[in-house]
Amino acid sequence: MTYDPFNPANQPDPPPADPSGEGAGADIVHLDAARAGRHPTAPAQRPDDDPDPTSPAPAATGLDPRPAAYDTSYEVELDEPPDDDADAEAPPVDLPEPALLESPEGDKRRPIIPTSLRRHNLTATARRTAGQVAYVAGFHAVRAPWYAAQALWWAPVGLLRLAGRQLRWWWVNEQYTLLQQAASDNDPAMWLKLHKEGKATRRWRGLALFFQVIALIVAILVAVGADLAPLWWAGIAAMLVPVLARYGRPVGRQIIPTAVVARRYRLLNSDVVLRAYYAAGLGHPDKPNQQVKFGSRMSRDAAGTGSEVVVDLPYGKTFEDAVKARGAIASGLDVTVQQVYLTRDHTSNRRHLLFVADRDPLAIPAGKTPLLDGKPRNIWQPAPFGLDERGRKVTLLLLWISILVGAQPRKGKTFAARLLALYAAMDPYVRLTVVDGKDSPDWRKFALVAHRIIFGTMPNRDGDPVEMLLDALREIKAHIQQVNQFLSTLPVSECPDGKLTEELSRKYPNLRVWVLVMEEFQVYYELDDQEKNKEIASLLSFIMAVGPSAGVIIISSSQKPSGVGAGDVQRLFSRYRDNHAVRFALKCGNRPVSEAILGGDAYAEGFDASSLPVGKQYRGVGYLYGASDDTPTVRTYLADAEDAEKILTTARTLRERAGTLTGYAAGQTMVRDVRDVLADALTVFEGSETGLPWTFLASRLAERIPEHYADLTADAISAQLRALAVPSVDIKRDGKALKGAKKAAIAAAIKRRESSAG
């Protein structure tokens, strides 16, 4: 398992940064000083506490304490606009720290080359920047005629407004208030003084305005007399019309709107986080040693999808306490629980990273599977599984583990299991056995690559699925024993640790990695034949216990992970289910089902798949438990039926080139280990048939089970069944009475055999 939330390789590509690298030098507002006017008594420690209590407030430093978002155009107002006074004091979200490097002396240094401009990110940065520029250019190009029409409309209005402003400037309108005040105060001396100053000001302003008009007339006459080309007139108009139109447009109305509307998100600051944690019962602001503190600055995450901060719980509180209180924390933050995620910090059990997404990340599809690129895969490398709540890639190393997938019907269980099987299929050196207990179309196309493929429990044209499953499991068991025996015979130079390696699995065909898919595996624990139930359960338990070390990977899925079987079968079922190393639980109906899939420890840690959101947009969303120390909420990649067929067609081509097609996919006949003429005869009855003539029995057995009955005749099958106490009777067929056997008689013979064996 390669998933690690703190591994930079799993982080999404960072957005393009300012090539100048000056973004880190933005003005920083001192939040404590800004809050001081609102909260005379400082609460618990903030992420940006400054030990210097004399730090100036924003008003004293001349900085605007409002966030930059106030200057951005939005189409939707999320919250009520604050009062003017509150607006002036509202602190912004803390500015994110730039990526810092540690010097040998322990100092933090900003990188010389911004992260987005480094060689491995340069292509992505250029692609994103070019895409954004192209979009903005296209947006405005389409609307350019409308912009021009508006500019021509508002330019004359702007010309009149400009003329009116010049006249008001000439007449010294701003002096009117002072004259009125002098008259109200009965101060004739002041009024006379202001009047004289006004006359003098009007005189020189009038002269200035006169010369402005003369200069404008002269410029127009010169331009007309010079007989300028139309291009010059167009250039002059292009310079003057936008200026006049901007001056003439109504206040608050844009002629050229923004092409990209900035995303709105709820501001997250220290006060909000503390309120949420205290409301969730994870501390108390007034009790000693019960204050919640912060271990980092509050900042935007690298992908710009939310806010994050390291939280230090009071002594005695644990990360598990915070996980259990996740819903209460979300309520305190006034967001949905799907927007709140906690990540364990390995330095302390009371410390964790709080991430609050701007929007519900689970409702954003992960997209199509990368397997559609048609490139060969390597089972020894992690398989792409989906994206976590932070948009980071989640991969799963299939080797050495077994995976259990469980959920309610139609929540994405089969798609999730099939996604992993498709990855295995794209490695031409992996052998696949696919068993579909629900006999659905979802796995049919695996016939293109599968060594064995089995559907349902009812006999069909391919034979008895239960017998086929027993043969397949016996084959895998023999393979496991053969692999372990063969590895023990290899020299130390070739197999140093006595374990299977990628080189050995490629070199020796008998050491291939084997993937066993068990879709709705509980069906095979509930058969009418208890002896077969026990044998299937025993074989699966053996493969589960010993198989992973021999390169056998098990992918199991079930919508009924509990309450199956009785006695030894129930014990073996629970043993098989509980021994899966990795579990993936999508939406479950109730908590007991979630515990059956994830295990009881998962619920104690706060992971309950029955609490996952409901809705079409949440299909394929689940908890991935046991793959690492963390339990990400994964949005699986999508591979629908059409995508699966494309991938499997490509996988078959890869296997044909490598010469690794075997079994069913290669058209090979699977020879069974045992022959049961009674059971085989019973499988060839179709629909409501109560009896079959010997000729029909012989032909159907020869067609469906040729490895045992290829040359079977009517007399031969009659003799074999009569020897087992199945009487030969008249069977009406097409209006004729022909000798044959009754279905009930064959079933009775099987029961007599079982009772005598017991």
Image (cartoon, grey):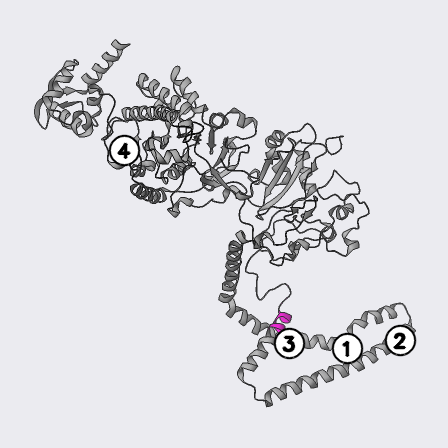
Q: Is residue 246 magenta?
A: yes
Mark 3 is on which residue type?
Leu
Of tags 3 and 2, the one toward the viewer is 3
Q: CA distance from mark 2 to mark 1?
A: 17 Å
- Whichever of labels 4 and 1 marks the residue nearer the N terminus, that label is 1
* Element marked by disc 1: loop
Q: CA distance from mark 3 to mark 2?
A: 35 Å
At which x and y percent is residue 24?
A: 66, 53
Q: Is residue 395 left or right of residue 683?
A: right
Mark 1 is on which residue type?
Trp
Q: CA distance from mark 4 to mark 1?
A: 100 Å
Q: What residue occupies the far bottom of the structure in this picture? A: 225
- Whichever of labels 4 and 3 marks the residue nearer the N terminus, that label is 3
Q: Give the crowd class for mark 4: few <14, some 14-19, many >=20 residues within 10 Å.
A: some
Residue carrying label 3: 159
Q: Which residues are magenta?
A: 242-253
At which x and y percent is residue 340?
A: 59, 39
* Element marked by disc 3: helix
